[in-house]
Each structure stands twice: as C-alpha cells, then as structure tokens.
Image (cartoon, helix red, strand yellow):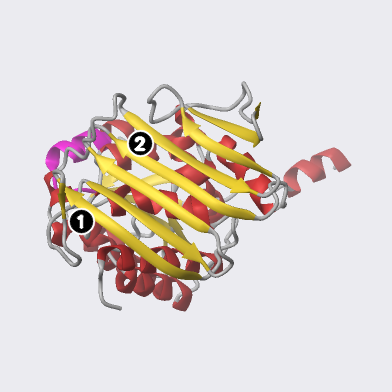
Amino acid sequence: MSSAVKHVSSEIAPRRPRLGFVGLGWIGRSRMESVMQADVAEICALHDVTAAMVNEGQKLAPDAAVFSSFDELLDQDLDGVVIATPNCFHAEQAIAALKRGMAVFCQKPLGRNAAETRSIVEAARKNESLLGVDLTYRHIPAMQRVRSLVETGALGKVFAVDAKFHNAYGPDKPWFYDLALSGGGCVLDLGVHLIDLALEPLRSPAVTRVEAALFSKGRLLPQGSRDIEDYGVATIETADHTVITIGCSWNLHAGRPADIEISFYGTEGGASLRNVDGSFYDFAGERFNRTEIETLTSAEDSQWKWAGLATLDWVRKLAANEPFDPAIDRLITVAEIMDNIYGHEA
C-alpha cells in the first residue's frame, strides 16, 4: 500500500454533532438554517408547541424527527440542544438538558435574572458540558476589530463606553410584554447585548455602581415596578473608573428601523461599531483619532450572515469535544447588573 493511500485512510473526518432544536420561531429557524448551510451538524430532533412552527421547521429539516414534548426530545441520542423558547423556559430546559450530559446553546438572555443564570451556569459546570449563548453581535467582524483595539491598549486607558440599541418596531410576540414570561422589557432584551459588548473587551472588571431609569409609554417607572419598560437608560461604573452608559428602546420614534452603536473612548483614541442606514444586519467599524476617522470594515465582511456565527462557534466547539468553559461566568456578572437595573433583590 502506498504512503499516499495510508495518509488518506488515517484521516479522521470531523465529528458531526447530533442536535435537537427547541423553539422553531424565526430565531430558532434562522440558527438552524445557518447550521445546515455550513453542514457542520445533523439536525435530528425538533420540538415546538405550535404546529405552524413545527411545519416551518420541517421545511428546513425534513429528515428530523418531531417530538410532542421537550422531555421526549431529551430521551433521544443527542449531543446538544439549541433552545430558542421564551425566556421563562430557558432555565428549566437548559438545566434538564445539561443534566442529561448534553451541550446547550440558548437564546439570550440566558436567564430572567441572576439566580436563574447562575443555576444554568452551575449545571453546565457540574456536568462539564459546553454552554453557549446567542450573543451574536460580539461575532460581527467589525466588532472583533474594535474589541482588539481595546484589548491591546491601542486606545490607551478606556474611560468611557457609550452604547445604544433602539428597535423602532419592538417585539411582535405577546410574551415579551408579560413580566412573568420575559423577566423584563427592552433593557433585558437589547441591553444584554450592549453590556456584554462593553465588558468583554474591558476584561470584565468589577462593577461598583449601577443607576437606571426605566419608562413605559413615556412614564417613569418606580423601582421594582411590574410593568414592562419600552425605554431605559443605565449608567454602570467599574472598579477601574470606566463609565458605561446604555440606552435601549422598543417602538421609539427613531426615524429608522434600528439605531445600534457602541463606542469606546480612551486616552489615545476611540473606536465604534454602528449599524448602517438603520439596518439590523449591516454594520461598520471605525477608529477615531481626534477629528480623523479610519474605517475598520472590509469589503469582505458579511452583512446578514453574522447572525448565525455564535451558533456555528458553539457547534464547532462541540464537534471538537470542548468541555465547559469557565469564561461563561461573565454572563452571571451581566445578569447581576441587570438585577441592579431592575431593582431586583440579590
């Protein structure tokens, strides 16, 4: 047998994880489609409580088995589960899957509060299972360039971060407006992205102060209100004296579908990620030197395809048999900040 033949026969094809998808709305199907297009896993099992959503899921994955309950899906021989259900189900479903030894990829927010978030992370740690969360914006190529400038010190000491996420449409699902189901309004839905994007490049410093104001239809809400906010602002101060400000809204008269931006300001320069022309999918990165602007975005940067990159990153780690990653602890910090914004008791 020739050496060439020996070399080919000794190659091991990458493992294709067997996945189940739970929650087959637009987000769930979008993440499923990204996995199928990349051809990195087998879609083996589907579950949703709505027949119409199951039908839509089957159009994408006709060979996948459909299960009438989440427990039935967990009884299958699966490597991982992708969860895209309402927030109130995340902790229960994620922990159940993790206890079965399955990896979990969950929609954000991971939990409705810090207690739920911590319980999921601890279940993943205890079972040494891979846990991923769909914080998609961190995977935008331009954001990764901005992050690199912060992490390498190219901007000097970063002392201010300004971030905003205004969704002029707002959610179209009723459960978003039910506190028991959602856990919070626009700040929990959108602000979780901004806080994650702000803290990670700063290497997750300790937070010493959080102040916030939440509004519903223009009315300032008292702390601990059970009403769902559609506008919110927060100021977050870190132990090394960086001040982070965030603003979020649903249905704001923003003059465009979306207004998304996060800017880092340091002693030696600044950098920003922002959406282009009101798009939810097209982003630009810029570096600032006083009045000068350097474009960080390349012509090769994708527009809409970044939305599935977090899912693909998790699948590839799963295929490589990567275990629990302690860096996921950062999501507990994000959830604790959210608790402070909403006035939840520790």
Residue 296 is left or right of residue 171, and the answer is right
Residue 278 is left or right of residue 112, and the answer is right
Residue of label 2: 30
> x%, y% of residue 96?
30, 69
Q: Quadrant of residue 180?
A: bottom left
Distance Cα–Cα, label 2 vs label 1: 21 Å
The one of 175 and 241 positioned closer to us in this rendering: 241
> x%, y% of residue 73?
27, 58
Does the magenta segment cover residue 285?
no
Q: Secondary structure at mark 1?
A: helix
The C terminus appears in which quarter of the rendering? bottom left
Residue of label 1: 182
Q: Residue at x 41, y 21 (%)?
A: 277
Badge 2 or badge 1: first in the primary sequence? 2
Magenta-highlighted residues: 47-58
Q: Residue at x 20, y 56 (%)?
A: 182
The N terminus appears in which quarter of the rendering? top right
Q: Residue at x 43, y 61 (%)?
A: 236
Tell me the kind of residue under disc 1: Ser
Residue density around tag 1, few if under 14, some if 14–19, many if 20 or more, within 10 Å: many
The correct choice, above or below, for 61 with respect to 311 in the image is above
The one of 24 and 71 positioned closer to us in this rendering: 24
